[in-house]
Image: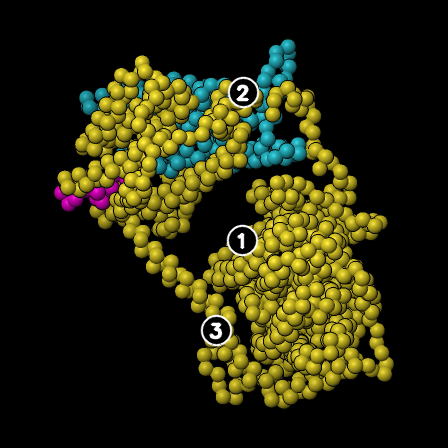
Chain colours: A yellow, B cyan
């Protein structure tokens, strides 16, 4: 800290980083750049569009960023040569926490998915979003959309590449925040607020479980570096023998189940479908919900040996798999079908993770992400072309949108398990692992899930494209030519899935890359087809057969192909007619009334009611607030002060010659204070209170505390100015409140207020005396004085503020700014309402000399900018 | 008429005094920032002084006139102040030390040895934030009171 030692620092060179920061190579910094680039551009985009640049074509920077990231990730992986790109920056040195990123196999797989699919989504949105914003009358800028999308991309990349426990948690919650921002993109609709809050409270709330688990894990292993924990068997053994196993397992399971929308925490995902379709395609099918299973895979090396971990995962996975598929079958909104399908498919993944089949799980994640993102984009295409999103209003679109029909067929039937598409191998791999687990119940559940998946996917595609026309002849369907720019990314996804189906090695090479980080000893996933059929293939054939039968049965009984469907309404029909009472529909009705989603919704309403009840304490009368503020210290003083033992019996006479000065000052202060209560004019009262402050400043000056005296004078002046301004503004309303009907405060009221004020002053005086008598330690004060000398300054107070306690001061000025902004907003609102009230008053009196009318005085509370009011 | 003339004279006195006092207060505020470590007074008091001097201008010269002459900067002052504080703090991080570690040193410029410190920037940041906040509050409170009823 001494000036001499650091004199060299001012020689013009800023030493960029000590030893901790300087040992990373360029490619390591590139990894940091991959994570930071989307975040930085996300910050810059709204600024740029505020200045007017890029407001129309804001998808271009997003596209470029995604492309750069994709290329960078592939390059980093390709140039790996034994050591993955890794960077560790010091963050909380005292706790050993770092900002650490590492591109190992698992990170590579997920990062590839995030940036690759992100690229396609941005390309799709370029054409889709402007139309969507217009149709739904959303008054937000495009640049905001891409900024939020990039923010998500950055936080997701940070999450998958994170190699430190706290970094992981930071970016985990970052994805929750960005999901919130994107779901609530349509700010004006109540529904989106609700859905976004629901999604956030469930995923971020469960994220607290992750935090607890991480803290427990790092405490028992004494290390926050995830790779260090994973790679060292001693640390893992230490943890497993320790007391925190249940906590960590519970916390991670909770967070993962909530994030990946597994039963019972799945309820936020169907509601989240109010987001724009590209958001659903990106976040809520392919990447963000994958974060949950990513977390499970990340911690599998540590938690795998715990038997409950696998068991719980398998249970949750199996239940979700069947449940999601069953509910998807009875949905009518396209996006709802896909939402429940996502829930069900992640049940597959969870089940595989529970069985320990990590390679298969990663394969399914990859294949599913491509298929599901593509399917959501197809929904976007269909709704763009027809303006409808419900199967009951669609049908026979294969004539008008042939290419879309083909592409959707590839994706939908692929997810159902059709051969030649990656979905077929998805099912194969899944059945193989389930059969290897040798559990009859699991096999039955999986078979049921597979059949239902097949059925709902076929239904999905059939109802949109092939079923006899439910669309009236005159309905406007956009020609496919206009959809072409949006078809490109979808077709690309379909093509990728096709190539994965024809050549599964493409996908297995990627999933095996991820596998080596999860289970380095495991052999890679082998995909092969046995003929004559072995048990796995047999299961697949049975799935198809029974699926076909189910489809035919449903078609016959007119469930699927409702020829004469009534027009859909916003809410589900309250009473269902006799012939529509299928078990599935009944189940859905039960869920709606007593399910978890309803529990959550009702809970929120109850919470609202509770807060409104508690808010009754806010009476709105200034006097009540002041009395409440005074009552607490007085009560505390009365209760606690009599317990003080050591009172200062004698006062050290350091400033003997100034005794008379202090006496005079005391007299002046007391008389000013008393006078302020007796005087009639409020302004005089305020000035006298200010006078007391000035007297105190003089006292400080005499006590050799010039800095405090200066600050006291200035602050007292500012305070007096505020009070005078406030009096000027609140003159009328305060008068009416405080004064009685005769326009003057009654003597009793005044006397009681003086009493309260005196009691408050007495309590504080006695408290100060008690503190003075407690005999404090001079150590800190002397230390500060010494340090100030070392620094070469003379003013201790300023040095403490700016140097020693810099972070405190930083927090204080932030609070200062926020308080000023908030007060300014509130004052601006009041002024506005007053203006409109005054205007209507004057109009009623027919006064010609009324104030100049402000044109927007009608919208109450709308204008909260602290703008200028026009003066006549 | 005499009432009006008396008020006008009083107003003229206030106005001319204000116009003289205002730059003096600004200079004092500047000295508080630059001499923060040596004499009483730092960025915080400088900010309050500047805000008060603008309030003095409102009183002496008139709200509408001052608002017309000054640019709308309140919010940007706060933003600038907070950003500067952040940057100054980060400079500590970049040098491998904790957030907010300042640099003190002696620099020889043109034969004179100056003792400089980077905490002056932080003082400046505090000054900007406090000026912006307090001035903003004065604006919000004082708006519309020009036409006394």
Q: Earlier in the sequence, mark 3 or mark 2?
A: 3
Question: Under tag 3, what secondary structure?
Answer: loop
The foreground one among A465 and A815 is: A815
Q: CA distance from mark 3 to mark 2?
A: 73 Å
- Name the residue rendered at 62%, 51% in the picture: A219
Q: Residue at x 74, y 68 (%)?
A: A357
Q: Are marks 3 and 2 on the same chain?
A: yes
Task: Please give the label number shown on residue A249.
Answer: none
Q: What number of labels is visible?
A: 3
Mark 3 and mark 2 in contact? Answer it, CB < 8 Å: no
Residue B104 spot, x, y in % from top left: 60, 23
Left or right? Give the position of A709 relative to A295. left
The chain holding disc 1 is A
Relative placement, left or right, of A811 versus A741 is right
Badge number at residue A571 = 3
Q: Is residue A665 magenta?
A: no
Q: Marks 1 and 3, how far apart in space?
A: 27 Å
- The kind of secondary structure element at disc 2 is helix
The residue drawn where x is 61% and y is 11% is B112
Question: Residue A140 got which mark?
Answer: 1
Q: Which residues are magenta?
A: A730-742
Between disc 1 and disc 2, the foreground one is 2
Q: CA distance from mark 1 to mark 2?
A: 56 Å
**Secondary structure of the magenta portion, mostly?**
helix
* Residue denoted by label 2: A789
Q: Secondary structure at mark 1?
A: loop
Whether label 1 touches label 2, CB < 8 Å = no
Residue A467 in percent (x, y) is at 64, 81
Q: What chain letter is assigned to the residue under label 3?
A: A
Q: Nearer the viewer, residue A644 or B49?
A: A644
């Amino acid at each position: 800290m001494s000036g001499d030692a650091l004199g060299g620092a001012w020689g013009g060179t800023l030493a960029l980083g000590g030893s901790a920061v300087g040992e990373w190579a360029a490619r390591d910094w590139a990894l940091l750049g991959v994570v930071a680039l989307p975040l930085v551009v996300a910050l810059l985009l709204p600024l740029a569009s505020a200045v007017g640049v890029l407001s129309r074509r804001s998808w271009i920077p997003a596209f470029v960023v995604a492309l750069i990231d994709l290329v960078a990730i592939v390059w980093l992986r390709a140039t790996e040569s034994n050591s993955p790109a890794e960077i560790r920056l010091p963050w909380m040195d005292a706790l050993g926490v770092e900002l650490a990123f590492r591109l190992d196999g698992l990170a590579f797989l997920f990062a590839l998915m995030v940036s690759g699919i992100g690229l396609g989504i941005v390309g799709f949105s370029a054409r889709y979003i402007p139309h969507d914003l217009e149709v739904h009358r959303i008054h937000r800028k495009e640049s905001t959309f891409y900024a939020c999308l990039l923010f998500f991309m950055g936080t997701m990349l940070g999450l998958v590449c994170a190699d430190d426990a706290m970094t992981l948690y930071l970016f985990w919650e970052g994805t929750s925040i960005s999901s919130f921002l994107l779901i609530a993109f349509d700010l004006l609709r109540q529904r989106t607020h609700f859905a976004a809050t629901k999604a956030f409270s469930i995923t971020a709330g469960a994220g607290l479980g992750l935090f607890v688990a991480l803290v427990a894990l790092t405490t028992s292993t004494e290390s926050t570096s995830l790779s260090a924990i994973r790679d060292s068997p001693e640390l893992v053994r230490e943890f497993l023998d320790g007391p925190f196993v249940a906590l960590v397992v519970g916390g991670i399971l909770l967070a993962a189940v909530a994030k990946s929308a597994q039963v019972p925490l799945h309820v936020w995902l169907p509601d989240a479908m109010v987001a724009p379709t590209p958001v659903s395609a990106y976040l809520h099918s392919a990447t963000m919900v994958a974060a949950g299973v990513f977390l499970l895979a990340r911690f599998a090396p540590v938690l795998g040996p715990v038997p409950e971990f696998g068991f719980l995962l398998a249970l949750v996975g199996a239940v979700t798999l069947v449940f999601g598929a069953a509910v998807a079958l009875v949905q009518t909104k396209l996006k709802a079908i896909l939402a429940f399908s996502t829930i069900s498919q992640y049940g597959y993944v969870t089940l595989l993770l529970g069985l320990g089949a990590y390679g298969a799980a990663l394969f399914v994640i990859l294949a599913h992400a491509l298929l599901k993102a593509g399917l959501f984009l197809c929904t976007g295409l269909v709704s763009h072309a027809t303006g409808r999103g419900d199967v009951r209003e669609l049908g026979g679109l294969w004539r008008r949108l042939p290419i879309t029909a083909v592409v959707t067929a590839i994706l939908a039937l692929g997810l159902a398990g059709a051969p030649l598409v990656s979905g077929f191998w998805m099912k194969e791999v899944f059945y193989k692992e389930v059969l290897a687990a040798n559990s009859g119940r699991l096999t039955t559940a999986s078979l049921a899930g597979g059949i239902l998946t097949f059925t709902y996917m076929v239904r999905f595609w059939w109802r949109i494209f092939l079923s006899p026309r439910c669309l009236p002849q005159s309905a406007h369907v956009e020609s496919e030519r206009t959809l072409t720019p949006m078809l490109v990314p979808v077709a690309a996804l379909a093509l990728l899935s096709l190539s994965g189906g024809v050549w599964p090695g493409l996908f297995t090479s990627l999933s095996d890359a991820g596998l080596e980080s999860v289970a380095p000893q495991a052999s890679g996933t082998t995909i092969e087809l046995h003929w004559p059929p072995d048990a796995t293939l047999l299961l697949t054939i049975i799935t198809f057969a029974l699926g076909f039968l189910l489809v035919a049965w449903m078609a016959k009984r007119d469930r699927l192909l409702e020829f004469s469907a009534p027009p859909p309404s916003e809410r589900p029909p309250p009473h269902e007619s006799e012939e529509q009472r299928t078990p599935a529909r009944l189940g859905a009705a039960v869920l709606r009334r007593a399910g978890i989603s309803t529990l959550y919704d009702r809970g929120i309403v109850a919470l609202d009611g509770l807060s409104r009840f508690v808010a009754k304490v806010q009476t709105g009368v200034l006097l009540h607030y002041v009395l409440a503020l005074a009552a607490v210290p007085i009560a505390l003083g009365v209760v606690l002060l009599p317990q003080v033992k050591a009172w200062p019996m004698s006062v050290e006479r350091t400033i003997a010659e100034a005794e008379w000065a202090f006496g005079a000052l005391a007299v002046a202060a007391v008389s000013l204070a008393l006078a302020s209560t007796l005087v009639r004019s409020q302004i005089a009262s305020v000035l006298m209170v200010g006078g007391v402050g000035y007297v105190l400043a003089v006292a400080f000056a005499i006590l050799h505390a010039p800095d405090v005296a200066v600050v006291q004078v200035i602050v007292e002046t500012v305070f007096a100015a505020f009070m005078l301004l406030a009096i000027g503004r609140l003159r009328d309303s305060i008068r009416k409140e405080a004064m009685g009907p005769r326009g003057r405060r009654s003597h009793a009221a005044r006397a009681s207020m003086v009493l309260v004020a005196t009691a408050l002053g007495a309590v504080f005086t006695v408290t100060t005396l008690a503190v003075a008598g407690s005999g404090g330690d001079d150590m800190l004060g002397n230390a500060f004085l010494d340090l100030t000398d070392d620094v070469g300054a003379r003013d201790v107070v300023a040095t403490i503020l700016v140097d020693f306690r810099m972070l405190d001061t930083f927090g204080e000025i932030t609070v200062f700014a926020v308080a000023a902004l908030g007060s300014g907003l509130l004052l601006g609102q009041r002024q506005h309402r007053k203006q409109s009230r005054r205007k209507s008053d004057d109009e009623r009196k027919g006064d010609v000399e009324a104030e100049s009318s402000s044109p927007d005085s009608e919208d109450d509370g709308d204008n909260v900018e602290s703008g200028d009011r026009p003066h006549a | 008429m005499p009432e009006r003339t008396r008020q006008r004279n009083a107003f003229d006195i206030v106005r001319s005094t204000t116009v003289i006092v205002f730059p003096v207060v600004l200079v004092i505020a500047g000295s508080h920032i630059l001499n923060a470590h040596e004499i009483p007074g730092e960025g915080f008091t400088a900010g309050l002084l500047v805000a008060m001097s603008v309030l003095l201008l409102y009183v002496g010269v008139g709200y509408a006139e001052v608002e017309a002459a000054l640019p709308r900067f309140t919010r940007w002052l706060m933003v600038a102040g907070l950003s500067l504080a952040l940057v100054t703090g980060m400079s500590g991080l970049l040098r491998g030390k904790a957030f907010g570690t300042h640099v003190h040193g002696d620099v020889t410029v043109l034969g004179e040895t100056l003792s400089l410190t980077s905490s002056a920037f932080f003082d400046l940041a505090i000054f900007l934030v406090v000026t912006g906040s307090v001035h903003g509050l004065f604006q919000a409170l004082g708006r519309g009171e020009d036409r006394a009823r």
